Amino acid sequence: MSEVLLQVNNLKKYFPIRGGVFQRTIGHVKAVDDVSFQINKGETFGLVGESGCGKSTIGRTILRLHEKTSGDVLYKGTDLYSLSHSKLRAMRPKLQIVFQDPYSSLNPRIKIGDAIGEALLDHGIYHSKSEVRELVHETLNICGLASYHIDRFPHEFSGGQRQRIGIARALILNPDFIVADEPVSALDVSIQAQIINLLQDLQQTKQLTYLFISHDLSVVQHLCTQIGVMYLGSMVELAPRDELFNQPLHPYTKALLSAIPVPDPTLRRERIVLQGDIPSPANPPSGCKFHTRCPIAVDRCKQEIPAFRDMGGNHFVACHLV
Ligand code: SF4
């Protein structure tokens, strides 16, 4: 029986919209609206959807980089939001994040070795200078960088190498769980494959659990065991990877899958092109939020919010017509 490492229950994150002379709250952006899922130890859960659908906000709210509006986040059964400041700080090394653009979080004047070693000090993990240097060397090597890189500056690295540095900064803290927030989106396809291979290798050797966030279903296909599809702050479908790719149920998932190029040119997949732009999460459509773009919407969809129903086999979907 698999051990649940992370459980997210009915998570909501609303950002206030302020206006008027007194900057009063005049509305909310419902960035994450009642989302639930769990991740087993050693697995990779993929969160996919167009930009602005709330997937990055979920990652940050789990790690308490944003404070939740409501809901629960349980890590090994402990509610992260019930922890005192000091207990949360002690737990932080175990819960790490890798960003899309690690360069933006690196000080251009600080050598890479110091930047990676700094992560230990930031988290109150103290070692002697020589021990830190030794650990940094080891971590750089594990992440596919050479020892001599330790004394180089961020601008001397390529995009792929910078992402390896971002992974090294997380890895040196010996985490259990990593939120990988679009970690390969800014990279060329060949480099993407190298970083995904690195993440897979680290998962095997370090028993890591990932929440892998991407707007690209073809990327999550290689890495993830479970996939959740997000639309406008809500999860519309959740299924084991193969089930989702072979038996997608939600019209939005079908549209996303139809956009993936098929490697075999003799196979044709009908492209479903969604009309219109993604609506504003500050003013989402009534009923099913997808009804303004759904090719099969009926009148009921404008009025009733579809329940997130269990279709069996750990496959859930929110659609009136499924
Ligand atoms: Fe489309 Fe209606 Fe299903 Fe929403 S509930 S996905 S609008 S058919």
Image (tube, grey):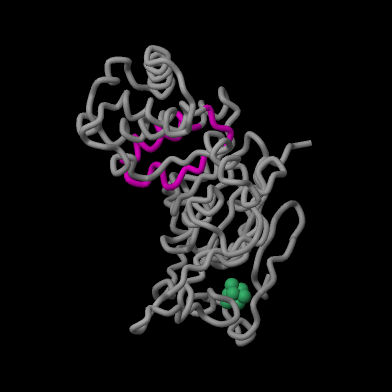
List the single residue furthest toward the right.
1
**Where 138 falls versus 217 (above or below)?**
above
User: In front: 318, or 56?
Assistant: 56
Residue 198 in magenta stretch: yes
Residue 152 at x, y percent in the picture: 23, 24
* 265 displayed left or right of 150: right
Residue 239 in view in this figure: no
Tell me the residue at 49%/61% (across/down). 54
- Picture quadrant of residue 253: bottom right
* 158 displayed left or right of 12: left
**Where 168 falls versus 29 (above or below)?**
above
Residue 95 in view in this figure: yes
Q: Quadrant of the C terminus?
A: bottom right
Residue 310 at x, y percent in the picture: 74, 61
* 86 displayed left or right of 26: right
User: In front: 85, or 202?
Assistant: 85
- Picture quadrant of residue 91: top right
User: In front: 264, or 317?
Assistant: 317
Tell me which segment is drawn in magenta.
Answer: 174-199
Residue 169 at x, y percent in the picture: 41, 31
**Where 260 falls versus 164 (above or below)?**
below
